[in-house]
Image (spheres, helix red, strand yellow):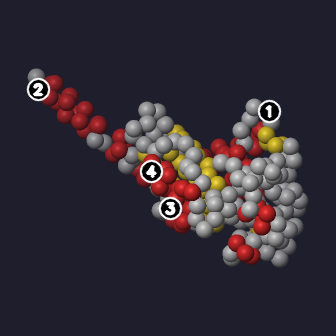
Amino acid sequence: MAWFQVMLFVFALVLRSPLTEGKDPDFTSLITNQIQVQREIVNKHNELRRSVNPTGSDILKMEWSIQATTNAQKWANKCILEHSSKDDRKTNIRCGENLYMSTDPTLWSTVIQSWYNESEDFVYGVGAKPNSAVGHYTQLIWYSSFKVGCGIAYCPNQEILKYFYVCHYCPMGNNVMKKSTPYQQGTPCASCPNNCENGLCKSPLSLSSMLPWCNCHLNQKEKD
């Protein structure tokens, strides 16, 4: 009887452990209200945006967005594990969205790299290879999406995929009319020779000062 009571006590401790509540250090170190996490996410995006092949002449440098982060975190907290509506990710403009689900806490750099790896199934000027999905990649490197905000949630009610990652990109990319050319091919910063930083065009101070050809992008036909 004493042995049975001890086992019940141990079992109760396991059920209440920080690991099963999503409070383990591996998870809390990924929460995006931390400056170092924001920096990791932005730097990884910019690293990958610089590395596109063929090179791009008009790709904007990414920066962190508090508004986009708020929306991304709100959606992550719902633990629905599917795309949000366009209204759920709207700031002063409409934003795109990338999602990732995992069984265990995964580094943000690994998550973002997994989206970029879809480039293996993408041919510039043609689009996705047959039976391939590349929307995470094209949104990640979309030339005019210069603000990013992300959130993560622990979803205990999900049977397997308990960690839910959400990133919002503003303005949204994946224009269905331009999805095979998510940026202008050319020498890095050729489109912004006086506004270049390490191979990427510096982010505009406002949408009205964005690259001239972005006006059509903001009024584009959209696709989730």
**Pair 2/4: label in front:** 4
Crowd rating for badge 3 (residues with CA inside 10 Å; few <14, some 14–19, many 20+): some
Residue 176 in sight here? yes
Say whether marks 2 and 1 touch (CB < 8 Å): no
Quarter location, residue 13:
top left
Please state if 99 lies on the left or on the right of 122 as rendered: left
**Pair 2/1: label in front:** 1
Residue 143's disc is none
Query: Looking at the rendering, in which quadrant would you find the N terminus?
Result: top left
Q: Amino acid at mark 4?
A: Asn
- Going from N to C along the chain, the mark reached first, 2 or 1, is 2
Say whether marks 1 and 4 touch (CB < 8 Å): no
In the picture of the structure, the residue carrying the numbered disc 4 is: 77
Residue 20 against residue 145 in the figure, above or below: above
x, y (%) of residue 31?
47, 56
* SS type, badge 3: helix
In the picture of the structure, the residue carrying the numbered disc 2 is: 2
Q: Amino acid at mark 2?
A: Ala
Residue 192 against residue 32 in the figure, above or below: below
Say whether marks 4 and 3 touch (CB < 8 Å): no
Residue under the image location 69 percent in, 76 percent down? 205
In the picture of the structure, the residue carrying the numbered disc 1 is: 130
- Going from N to C along the chain, the mark reached first, 4 or 3, is 3
In the picture of the structure, the residue carrying the numbered disc 3 is: 70
